[in-house]
Amino acid sequence: MEIEKAKAIIEAILFACGREVGIKELVSALEMNEEDIISIIEKMKQEYEEQNSGIEIIHVNDAYQMCTKKEYYEYIYPILDKRSKPNLSNAALETLAIIAYNPGVTRAEIESIRGVNSDATIYKLLEYNLIEEAGKLDAPGRPMTYKTTLNFLKMFGYASLENLPDLPRYKMDENQQIVIDDILEEKEQENEAPVPEREEEADTQKEEMKDEGEK
């Protein structure tokens, strides 16, 4: 198939679907190999950029989607949606970051890290479709776990969670998730009150007196 025809077909599919289209779907529709399709889409993305077009093609996990550029959001949103523009509070962003870096985290673990109740924040993130339920944990009480959605990736401009900035402060396990126990242990150490100097001196004096008595 000619490159220009393939580009036109891909453009038509992405425009008509209005959602992320998996690479396997495109392979099936065009009867081309995956490498060639990806190469064509990358050229299309470059062309849209060079033309200063109002639309772009984004990569989300193993799929592509045609969408408007985020810098034109303020002009589009009032026309398509009359609701007030959603805003994320610092608490919501903090909770979202915890979930993004640790898929499968529970509400109790989130609250242990943040130190405050997070029910309302989690509910708001679910409402905005930035997080979703990821199933129940095989533990006492069967608590619900949470993970981020494709909408989160699209909103923040990431192709996948692997593109999130590194967090060098905390250790990551073999699944590239934050080791929550280490965070909690670190918090406990920070909260431990140091022994007053006078108490330390008193203990030392007692030990010295005890040694002299034994002699």
Image: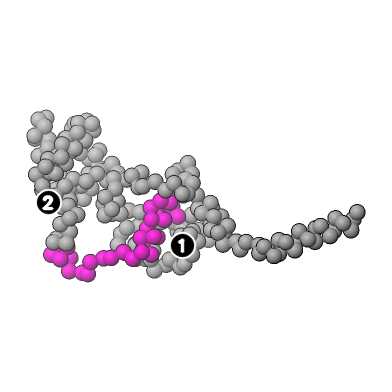
Q: Which of marks 2 and 1 is nearer the N terminus?
A: 2
Total marks in image: 2
Front position in the image: 52 or 173:
52
Question: Does 209 sit left or right of 54 as displayed?
Answer: right
Q: Say whether residue 117 is magenta.
A: no
Above-or-below relation of 18 to 121: above
Above-or-below relation of 111 to 22: below
Provide the secondary structure element on which disc 1 rests: helix
Q: Tag 1: residue type?
A: Arg
Q: Name the residue under label 2.
A: 54
Residue 79: mark: none
| Number of other residues with Cα within 10 Å of mark 2, as a class: few under 14, some 14 to 19, many 20 or more | few
Residue 24 position, x and y percent, is 25, 38
Residue 114 position, x and y percent, is 46, 62
In the rendered structure, which segment of residues is drawn in magenta?
Answer: 77-105
Question: Does 40 sit left or right of 98 as displayed?
Answer: left
Question: Does 113 sit left or right of 41 as displayed?
Answer: right
